[in-house]
Image (cartoon, rainbow, N blue to C red):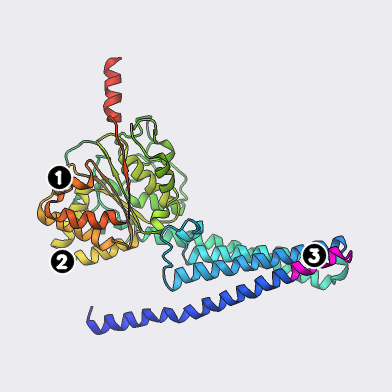
């Protein structure tokens, strides 16, 4: 893109700040409703104390207070959610009072929440009319009911349409999924930076269009709907990526995101055996399970020997992030190396890194199972540096960050500096879960 075009685009994008005064105007409106609330409350207290308030008046006054609060809630959703969506990220950085819905807010979510809030406000207004039915004309009751039903119908239609629109957006990113092999986390299998034969299928063969032609595994073109359910096995065992549970032909947005993430298996955080590791931060895992680190654009690094459940936890967080509305991509370190190497060879490394920005969370599994040459190490550094304070990474490694020079050589210090600056380091100590099962079976 030429420099004038880039400058013009940035200038147009900067006009979003014209909306900022509008949101501060809504803050002033919020103040007006605060005044109205306490004015109504004071009048209610005075009339109750002086004996001038009957039951109907009290009920109507309370409904007015509820109405004011609901409108104030609607305002705060528009102020915070709208500013975050259309103007600029607020950057709460994991603030303890951050609203749950703000972590995955988008224009679709915001519209549905506003519609449901309007229905709630309309319900309160209609209830006020029926409570004071003796002073309300039949004409007003009729049109109040019709308007309320119109609000309900429009909210239902909007909610129905938002599902297909979200699914369409998710499917448009399916081609971004990184290639993956059969080995899951902590599998102990040797990894190679060369591209496996199964990567021969180009991204053009997938059904969804992709901004960059990235190879995907051959098994990615198979049908998940006809796959058999998982067999009973260890929570840390490697499973075939095509063995997802069968489900109905209608796919929710969460299921689409989970499939697009290309996890080696589908695991839940609740399935993790917390008693197996000798040393494990359970409170830290519960904190991570809230996904605040994704909203705050922080990283997570799981460190421990093979078989201690690092990949299980990484996939569990990834699945939960998909369910919360985030786009996620999973691949082993060797597969990420192959993907980035191909992008660099094609002269589109910058475009590839920019395309990955559409995914708030990337998972890099099995770091440390094989060292990388200097060129590949530089590619990993560019990936980490590009996402620094911009998006989140989950990394699983078999050795602490202080020994990453054994993997990435001279690129390690700068990479670790950026990765660990805003990161939660989770250490797992213990014997391999798989070896424990194998030993038990041999003993029997």
Say which label, 3 or 1, has the lower sequence index. 3
Q: Is mark 3 on a helix, strand or loop?
A: helix
User: In the rendered view, does 175 fall on the left or right side of 139?
Assistant: left
- Within 10 Å of disc 1 (Cα), the crowding (few <14, some 14-19, many 20+) is some
Q: Give the range drawn in magenta.
A: 40-52
Which residue shows up at 30% across the image and 14% down it? 444
Locate the N terminus by quadrant.
Answer: bottom left
Q: Tell me residue 176's x, y (percent).
A: 30, 57
Looking at the image, residue 260 sits to the left or right of residue 55; the answer is left
User: What secondary structure is the stretch in magenta mostly built from?
Assistant: helix
Quarter of image, res 388: bottom left
Q: Distance between the residues labelled 1 and 2?
A: 22 Å
**Circle 3 residue:** 45
Q: In which quarter of the image is residue 428?
A: top left
In front: 153, or 323? 323
Q: Which of marks 1 and 2 is nearer the N terminus?
A: 1
Camera-side residue: 65 or 85?
A: 65
Judge whether residue 340 can be spotted in this image: no
| Numbered tag placed on residue 347 in the rendering | 2
**Side (left or right) of 334 relative to 108:** left
Q: Position of residue 218 (x, y in %)?
A: 24, 47
What's the CA distance linking mark 3 and mark 1? 75 Å
| Pointers 3 and 2 in contact (C-beta within 8 Å) | no
Image label count? 3
Answer whether residue 267 is magenta in the image.
Answer: no
Query: What secondary structure is found at the residue carrying circle 2?
Result: loop
> Can residue 250 be seen?
yes
Depth check, front residue: 406 or 218: 406
Where residue 62 appears, as percent x and y from the top left, is 76, 62
Q: Is residue 353 above or below residue 317?
A: below
User: Label 1 belongs to which residue?
Assistant: 192
């Amino acid at each position: 893109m030429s420099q004038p075009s880039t400058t013009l685009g940035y200038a147009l994008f900067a006009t979003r700040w014209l909306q900022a005064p509008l949101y501060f105007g809504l803050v002033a409106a919020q103040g007006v409703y605060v005044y109205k609330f306490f004015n109504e409350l004071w009048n209610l207290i005075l009339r109750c104390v002086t004996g001038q308030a009957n039951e109907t008046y009290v009920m109507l006054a309370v409904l007015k207070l509820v109405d004011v609060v609901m409108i104030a809630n609607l305002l705060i959703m528009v102020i915070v959610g709208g500013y975050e969506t259309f103007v600029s990220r607020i950057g709460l950085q994991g603030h303890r009072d951050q609203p749950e819905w703000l972590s995955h807010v988008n224009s679709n979510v915001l519209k549905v929440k506003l519609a449901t809030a309007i229905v709630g406000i309309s319900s309160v207004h209609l209830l006020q009319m029926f409570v004071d039915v003796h002073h309300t004309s039949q004409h007003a009751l009729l049109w109040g009911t019709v308007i309320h039903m119109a609000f309900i119908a429009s909210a239902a239609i909007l909610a129905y349409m938002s599902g297909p629109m979200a699914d369409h957006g998710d499917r448009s990113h399916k081609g971004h999924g990184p290639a993956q092999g059969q080995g899951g986390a902590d599998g102990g299998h040797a990894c190679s930076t060369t591209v496996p034969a199964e990567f021969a299928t180009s991204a053009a063969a997938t059904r969804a269009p992709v901004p960059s032609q990235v190879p995907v595994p051959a098994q990615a073109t198979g049908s998940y709907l006809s796959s058999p359910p998982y067999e009973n096995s260890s929570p840390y065992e490697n499973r075939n990526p095509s063995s997802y549970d069968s489900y109905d032909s209608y796919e929710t947005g969460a299921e689409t995101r989970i499939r697009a993430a290309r996890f080696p298996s589908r695991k839940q955080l609740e399935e993790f055996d917390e008693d197996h590791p000798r040393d494990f931060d359970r409170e830290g895992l519960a904190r991570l399970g809230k996904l605040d680190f994704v909203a705050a654009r922080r990283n997570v690094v799981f460190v421990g020997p093979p078989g201690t459940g690092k990949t299980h936890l990484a996939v569990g967080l990834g699945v939960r992030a998909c369910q919360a509305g985030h786009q996620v991509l999973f691949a082993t370190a060797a597969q990420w190396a192959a993907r980035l190497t191909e992008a660099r060879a094609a002269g589109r490394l910058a475009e590839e890194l920019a395309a990955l920005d559409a995914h708030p969370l990337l998972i890099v599994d099995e770091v440390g199972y094989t060292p990388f040459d200097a060129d590949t190490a530089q590619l990993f550094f560019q990936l980490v540096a590009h996402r620094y304070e911009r998006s989140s990474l989950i990394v699983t490694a078999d050795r602490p960050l202080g020994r990453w020079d054994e993997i990435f050589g001279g690129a390690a210090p700068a990479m670790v500096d950026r990765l660990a600056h805003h990161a939660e380091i989770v250490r797992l100590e213990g014997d391999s879960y798989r070896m424990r099962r194998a030993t038990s079976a041999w003993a029997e």
